[in-house]
Amino acid sequence: MRKILILCLLVFNVIPADLGANPPEPLSWKNHFVVSYLGIPVLDCYQDFNTKDSLITVVYDNQIKPFWAKFSDVHNIYAATFTGTDFSPRSDAKEVFEGKFLQSLAVTYDLPERQLIFDDGNRISWPEGYRSVFSAVHYLEGFARQLHYPLQLAILIEGARWRADIVDLGTTGISVTGEAVLTRHLRVTMQPAGQRSERLTKRTDVLMDFLTTPGSTLELWIDDTPQIVRAKVGEFPKAVVLELVKKDVMIHETD
């Protein structure tokens, strides 16, 4: 039910009313990733990727594996909509359940007013060139082989301004779903942009809290599809690794 509500929120916030008479058929696919810590699988991450008209909507549904749910329940859903050309954000939403910590947050990117409009009525300025976390990540995914490194991306995280410094670590061969794949390997390092601004919320989920830590790192391995097939958050020995385990997952396989 939460996932349906997030998708409805994104669609009604961003789909324009003056669509052409014969819009192209939407494209969608679903992938299954596994998240590991210290080499131990702890979470299943299901990615829904949908394209409609000139927009992309991606939803990440993160569910703790049954064994670990005995100790602490985790179920986080992140959703983002952005343009399919320059990956400019149009809306974000998340529902976070991390043990006793609950968080619900949604934001619309108002292009004419250059503002972020949050679901509680708060408004924050949206400077030119700033992307959301997920629109920035998928921008790198889509254009990894065309960009010139090192480069910087400006990112807004819950209203706070951050800078992502990206370097190219070269072509790396890894195993993906049992096959050898050549990937573009990128490292992203997060730093405050200018004076560190206060984010909208005083407390947030584990992922966004990590990304708003100066010097935090995110590594991406991107195949020639192009698709992110592996991601690593943090450094050894405390790194969290996300790996693609199956493409084109059917809905019944995620239950």
Image (cartoon, helix red, strand yellow):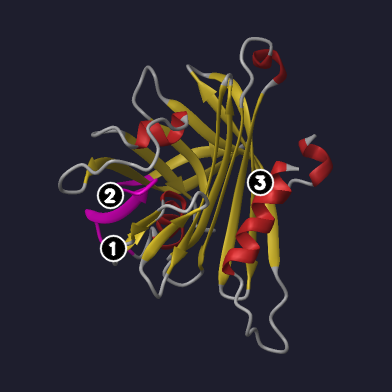
Q: Which residues are magenta?
A: 147-171
Residue pointed to by mark 3: 31
Q: Which residue is mark 1?
A: 127
Disc 3 to disc 1, how far (Cα)?
Answer: 33 Å
At label 1, the amino acid type is Pro
Name the residue carrying label 2.
161
Does the CB distance between marks 2 and 1 fall below 8 Å? yes
Q: Position of residue 115 (x, y in %)?
A: 38, 63
Sequence order check: which comes first, mark 3 or mark 2?
3
Tell which tag, 3 or 1, sits nearer the viewer.
Answer: 1
Crowding near the residue tagged with mark 3, few <14, some 14–19, many ≥20 C-alpha atoms within 10 Å = some
Q: Earlier in the sequence, mark 2 or mark 1?
A: 1
Quadrant (top left/top right/bottom left/bottom right) for the N terminus = top right
Q: Name the spot of residue 220 as percent of width and height, x first.
A: 41, 43
Q: Secondary structure at mark 3?
A: strand
10 Å crowding of disc 2: few (<14), some (14-19), many (20+): many
